[in-house]
C-alpha cells in the first residue's frame, strides 16, 4: 500500500514542513537488520498523508462519476455500488486516522513538562 503513495506537493501547503521532508540515509544498524539502501523509499510523513488524502479524494470523485453514469444508464449497478463502497471505505479510514491524530494531540497537550 505504501508503495502506491505518490508525492503530492500541491497538498502540502505548509511551508514549515520543508525541513522534515529530507531523505534519510541508511545507517549501519539498519543494514544489520536486513534493510538495504534499495529498500528504503525515503518518503516523509507529509508525503504519505498527502498521498492517502489524494487517494481518498480520487475514490470519492470516482464514486460521484459512477453515480452520474448510473443515473444516465451507461454504468451497471454493480460498478456504481463498487465505486461508492470504495469511497465509503476511504472516507471511514480517513476519519479514523483523523480521530487518532486528534486523540494523540490531546494526550500530548495533557502531559506535564
Image: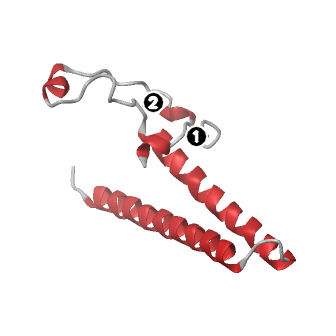
Sequence-wise first label, 1 or 2: 1
Vertical comparison of 58 with 48: above or below: below
Vertical comparison of 22 with 79: above or below: above
Position of residue 45 measured from the top left corner of the image (x, y, whole percent):
42, 41
SS assignment at label 2: loop
Is the Cβ of the residue at disc 1 closer than 8 Å to that at disc 2? Answer: yes
Position of residue 24 measured from the top left corner of the image (x, y, whole percent):
34, 24
Disc 2: which residue: 21
Crowd rating for badge 1 (residues with CA inside 10 Å; few <14, some 14–19, many 20+)? some
- At horizontal 39% and vertical 31% (from top left) the residue drawn is 41
Classify residue 13 as left or right of residue 64: left
Q: Quadrant of residue 23?
A: top left
Disc 1: which residue: 12
Real-space CA distance between mark 1 and mark 2, rounded to the nearest whole angstrom: 11 Å
Vertical comparison of 65 with 4: above or below: below
Classify residue 12 as left or right of residue 17: right
Which is nearer the eye, 40 or 81?
81
Classify residue 101 as left or right of residue 64: left
SS assignment at label 1: loop
Amino acid at each position: 500500500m505504501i508503495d502506491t503513495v505518490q508525492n503530492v506537493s500541491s497538498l502540502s501547503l505548509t511551508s514549515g514542513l520543508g525541513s522534515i521532508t529530507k531523505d534519510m540515509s541508511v545507517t549501519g544498524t539498519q543494514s544489520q537488520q536486513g534493510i538495504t539502501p534499495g529498500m528504503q523509499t525515503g518518503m516523509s510523513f507529509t508525503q504519505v498523508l498527502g498521498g492517502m488524502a489524494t487517494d481518498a479524494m480520487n475514490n470519492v470523485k470516482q464514486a460521484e462519476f459512477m453515480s452520474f453514469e448510473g443515473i444516465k444508464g451507461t454504468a451497471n449497478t454493480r460498478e456504481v455500488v463498487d465505486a461508492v463502497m470504495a469511497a465509503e471505505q476511504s472516507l471511514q479510514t480517513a476519519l479514523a486516522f483523523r480521530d487518532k491524530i486528534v486523540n494523540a494531540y490531546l494526550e500530548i497537550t495533557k502531559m506535564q513538562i
